[in-house]
Amino acid sequence: MLDIHPGLMIWTIITFVILLFILKKAAWTPILKALDDREMGIKANIEAARKAKEEADLAIEENRRKLAEAQAEAQKVIAKARQDAERLGEQLKAQYKAEADAARERAIKEIDLERQAAVNEIRKEITYLAVAAAEKIVGKSISAEDHKRLVMEGIQENFN
Amino acid sequence: MINHFGKTWNFSRIFLLTLLITLFSAFPVVTLEAAEHETTTEHAATEEHGEGHGNTLDIVHHLTDLNNIEILFWTFSLEKLHFEVGGIDMSITKPVIFMWLALLVLLLSFTIPFRSGKLMRNKFSHLMECYIIFIRDEVVYANMGEKDGRPLLPFFLSVFFFILTCNLLGMIPSGHTATGNINVTAGLAVIAFFTIQGMGIAKNGIFKHFKAMLPSGLPVFVIPIMIPVELVGMFAKPFALCIRLFANMVAGHAVILSFFGLIFLAQSIIIAPLPLAGVLFISLLEVFIAHLQASIFTILTVLFTSMTMHPSH
């Protein structure tokens, strides 16, 4: 165990050198290469995943932005529509009011005219009736001049 | 407690498994004791030895016997594999056999589960991948940087797994810890030494490498003192690596065997559960130490190599 035994030392060195050469050829080179390949693959996958995530993030951001834009647009459209509707309503209301007013005015005016016409008609009718009555009472026809004067006098008396 | 593979591992299951391993690891000691007893009784018959000597347990012999591999009740002798090359004893002893076993285990562990070049094929390759990634990211890249670390990665992975496997083979019943022999750790330290110096020279050139050993801005009269200091430091680093690994590996086994020795010391089976509980605890600790020492050896080699490759002064 402790005694010096150079043969054993030489055997150790020989064994180790053989081991190193055999294992290097048969084991370490392929295993280390496989490890490197796998790590490279993992690294590439991670890179790809990160890139995909970045793209997805961008897409999400884009979508979010578009959505916000669309919402703003919609809000604007709605607001505009409401405003338009309100304005139209106001306009229509004013128009209808004006029309109604005009119609009332016209009606009032017509009524007035009708009344005037009726009054005139009645007046004319009364005149004839009065003349007729007067003719009957007087029994004779008076001249047209007289007739007229009398009527006017009568009218003035009766209507004033 | 749920492990990575979805299976539930409760404490009792782990405890039973460890107890089983411990009992199995007790076999060689028991057989050793029995053999010892036989020899001593024979001795007693022939040389009239005193009574009670047969109850001693030769722990040192168990740790230092390099010529017999004991598997349960069978003993395989390696005496026939003794030979010399150029005056150096190049015998194939127990540590050599177990280093080759480690080589075989590693070769099988890193080829069959990893065949077809795909990772995560099964639980075992998943586990090994954890070790590899630990060594790569936490040890080599963290201390040397990816650029310098990548070409040396196979070397450091080999160092780590070779030491780890050698350490763990000692935990298997009838196993032997090759790293519990100072010659083996010395061999590893020599490899570490040449790597540390060699990479420094390869990176910075031979002149700059040795010049960088002396801190710049030193007064001229200090230089003659600093040269031997730095030279000692250069050899002290791998020497410390060698001793640390060796001592840690031997200590654990010595403690385990001492606990078993308590049973024979007390000469009673009633006391057995107590040392067994101690052995169980130390065995779990040993598994941890096996990993710790393998990673420490690797981390320090990486650090020293990194220091010579990137001298700060």
Image: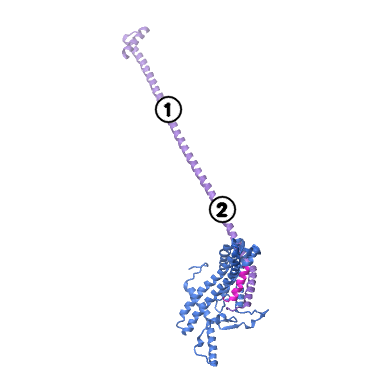
Chain rendered blue: B
Please state, as top left, top right, bottom left or bottom right, where the N terminus of chain A lies in the image: bottom right
Residue B113: percent from left, percent from top: 60, 69
Between B92 and B247, the one nearer to me in the picture: B247
Residue with the most extreme right position: B86
Residue B192 appears in which quarter of the rendering?
bottom right
Provide the letter of the chain coloured purple: A
* Quadrant housing residue B164: bottom right
Q: Main secondary structure of the magenta part?
A: helix
Nearer the observer, B123 or B189: B189
Where A94 sits versus B233, above or below? Answer: above
Q: Which residues are magenta?
A: B180-195
Label 1 or label 2, whichever comes before in sequence order: 2
Residue position marked by numbered label 2 in the rendering: A52
Q: What colour scheme governs how the chains and residues are painted in the rendered image of this protein? A: by chain
Question: Does B184 appear in magenta?
Answer: yes
Q: Which percent across, then down, holds residue A36?
A: 60, 62
Residue B243 on image: x %, y %: 56, 73
Label 1 amino acid? Answer: Ala
Quick one: label 2, few (<14), some, or many (20+) residues within 10 Å?
A: few
Q: Quadrant of residue B302?
A: bottom right
For disc 1, the marked residue is A98
Report if the CB atoms under discs 1 and 2 are less than 8 Å apart.
no
Which residue type carries mark 2? Ala
Q: Secondary structure at mark 1?
A: helix
Give the spatial CA distance, label 1 vs label 2: 67 Å
Furthest toward the front, the residue is B221
Please indicate, yes or no, whether residue A6 appears anywhere in the rendered image: yes
Chain for numbered disc 1: A
Residue nearest the viewer, comparing A43 with A156: A43
Residue B55 vs A71, above or below: the answer is below
